[in-house]
Image: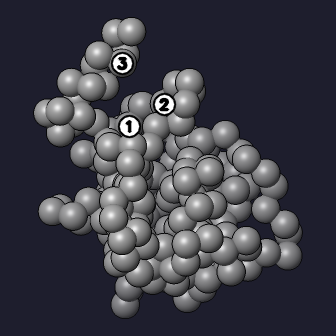
Amino acid sequence: MLRQTLAIAAVFFGTWPATAQTQGGGASSEVAGGEEEPVRTVEEWNLAEKTRLAISGYDPVAYFPEGGGAAVKGKPGIEFAYKGAVYRFASEANRERFKAEPRKYEPAYGGWCAWAMLDGEKVEVDPKSFIVRDSRLFLFFDGFFADTRAKWQRADHDAEEAKADARWKSISGEDPPATVEETPKDAPDGEK
């Protein structure tokens, strides 16, 4: 009862995500029924300041094999807001996949560079530089002097992931998502 009262008050004052989808396929959000939501400190996430757009508008599902395995820009008319972040999708099907398992498709470390997170630093990414492994999306900085994705791939992924997870937890208070399913070994390992 208290949770319902708080939710109604939060929606009224604009601090809780709405549950209804907007007209025309615009942004929407919903909270999974009966499940405890993980801690979210959206202030720590790599989001566009005014729009709260994540991954510079790239479709988070498109990175995964079921979404095509490539970095693809989402369409402004196909959006979904989840726990303070707005995601765009290349197709309605990808939006529905995301809505069914949002924690699976959200980027690791709030969308910051996975390599930089080893040192607890929040560094912008190139959305086309990524790795999908163990049902997680890792994004990387790729600039003139540094290709952090290549550095990550030359090292021990499991050790890097554990260290970056710990740093992200200390920054944001968020635990990494549980592995949903093993990504096939022959799945694409990102673009450049």
Residue 68 falls left or right of residue 21? right
> Residue at coordinates 60% horizontally, 75% vertically from top-left?
62
**On the rendered structure, is 22 left or right of 70?**
left
139 relative to 17, above or below: below
Instruction: State the separation of the CA atoms marked 3 and 1.
Output: 19 Å
Q: Position of residue 134 (x, y in %)?
A: 73, 55
Task: Name the outermost residue toward the front.
Answer: 23
Q: Please name which of the two marks, 3 or 1, marks the residue nearer to the observer.
A: 3
Say if residue 105 shows up in the picture: yes
Q: Of circles 2 and 3, which is in front?
A: 3
Residue 57 seen anywhere in this rendered image of the structure: no
- The crowding category of the residue bearing disc 1, from other C-alpha atoms within 10 Å (few below 14, some 14 to 19, many at least 20), is some
Tell me residue 94's x, y (percent). 59, 69
Give whichever of 89, 125 is nearer the camera.
89
Amino acid carrying mark 1 in the image: Arg
- Residue to which mark 3 is pinned: 4
Q: Which residue lies under the disc numbered 1?
A: 40
Q: Residue at x 38, y 48 (%)?
A: 20
Q: Are the two marked residues, 2 and 3, in contact with CB atoms closer than 8 angstroms?
A: no
Which of the pair 136/104 is nearer the observer? 104
Residue assigned mark 2: 37
What's the amino acid at mark 2?
Answer: Glu
Q: Is residue 88 above or below residue 179?
A: below
Whole-percent x, y for residue 179 in the image = 71, 45
Q: Secondary structure at mark 2?
A: loop
Neighbor class of circle 2 (other Cα within 10 Å; few <14, some 14-19, many 20+) is few
As measured in the structure, the alpha-carbon distance from the residue carrying label 2 to the one carrying label 3 is 15 Å
User: Residue at position x 50%, y 58% from top?
Assistant: 107
The x, y position of residue 111, in whole percent, is 42, 60
Q: Amino acid at mark 3?
A: Gln
